[in-house]
Amino acid sequence: MNELNHLAIIMDGNGRWAKRRGLLRTKGHETGANVVEQMCEFCIDEGVAILSLYAFSTENWKRPKSEVAFLMDLLHKFLLSKRESFIKNGIKFNVIGDESPLSDKLKNEINEIKNATAQNSRLKLNLALNYGAKDEILRAFRRFCEKNGGEFDAQNLTLNLSEDSLQTCLDEPTPIDLLVRTGGEQRLSNFMLWQASYAEFAFTPTLWPDFTREELALITAKFKKKDRRFGGL
Ligand code: FPP
């Protein structure tokens, strides 16, 4: 049986879910936000150590201004409403991605909740915000250079550069075991390219607001029985 240490989810299909009901796309995001708690509960019950959720990509800024503003406000409200339950349930909250362009209001809430949950250890929840895998790898390389004497110490950089040393500079260094994408599309959309190098993939047509812990349980049961060879025999 495979161990599920790191589960990642691309939460897709909110807009279509809303459209099919004659509702605004924003209603889909709002309903989608309510699914997150169930996923955390599942992970805690099943002993999953890390849950990474794709909430807002570096490319999502291209959406209409009003949708971006709604998502940012929703994220802020989500964090405010979940702070106590994260503390109580042992969830260590973390953000992956470049936080710098986020509003001060959102950044402050992120910092508060990160600090309040820093000692928790039942589940690490990574929320990907302004996240792009290529951007993460670039930032990791910059971090690596800073740690290794800066851009002028070329010899030191070359000596110390390895897959392992660069990996430790990523926002999240742990490899993904299982990557789930809801909403029917079968693509990675610039999500955790490095960490997904040997991930198992599961794609479901279910739109994110309709996704349940029962469906996740079926997907993870299948994952546990897979033959994972990591390039070996
Ligand atoms: C994809 O649906 C979803 C997003 C771009 C954002 C994900 C956001 C949420 C699940 C809600 C907010 C989450 C939190 C944690 C507060 P889409 O709009 O691309 O759907 P579509 O493909 O049907 O248009």
Image (cartoon, helix red, strand yellow):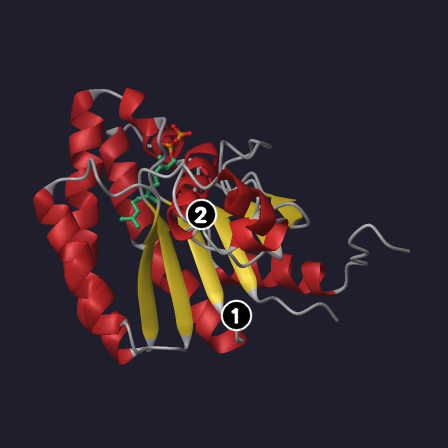
Q: How far separated are the C-alphas under marks 1 and 2?
A: 29 Å
Judge by depth and name the residue closer to the eye, 134 or 19: 134
Q: Which mark is residue 48?
A: 1
Work out whether mark 1 precedes mark 2 in sequence or the reverse, and give the earlier one. 1
User: Which label is found at residue 213?
Assistant: none
**In front of the other: 118 or 141:** 141
Image quarter where the N terminus lies is bottom right
Residue 5 sits in quarter:
bottom right
Vertical position of residue 42 compared to residue 157: above or below: below
Q: In the figure, residue 103 lies in which quadrant?
A: top left
Label 2 Cα crowd, 10 Å radius (few <14 / some 14-19 / many 20+):
many
Can residue 103 be spotted in the picture?
yes
Q: Secondary structure at mark 1?
A: loop
Disc 2, SS: helix
Name which residue type carries label 2.
Phe
Q: Which of the four quarters of the rendered structure image does ligand 1 lie in?
A: top left
Closer to the camera: disc 1 or disc 2? 2
- Residue in view at x 21 percent, y 28 percent: 67
Residue under the image location 66 percent in, 70 percent down? 3
Q: Mark yes or no: residue 181 visible.
A: no
At 56% from the left edge and 40% from the top edge, which residue is drawn?
193
Residue 113 lies left or right of residue 134; in this view the side is left
Q: Say if 18 sits above or below 146 in the image.
A: above
Crowding at dot 1, Cα within 10 Å, few <14 / some 14-19 / many 20+, comes out as some
Q: Position of residue 141 (x, y in %)?
A: 46, 41
In the rendered structure, which amino acid carries the disc numbered 1? Val
Question: Mark 2: is the Cβ under 8 angstroms from ligand 1?
Answer: no
The residue at which mark 2 appears reads as 144
The residue lying furthest to the left in this view is 105
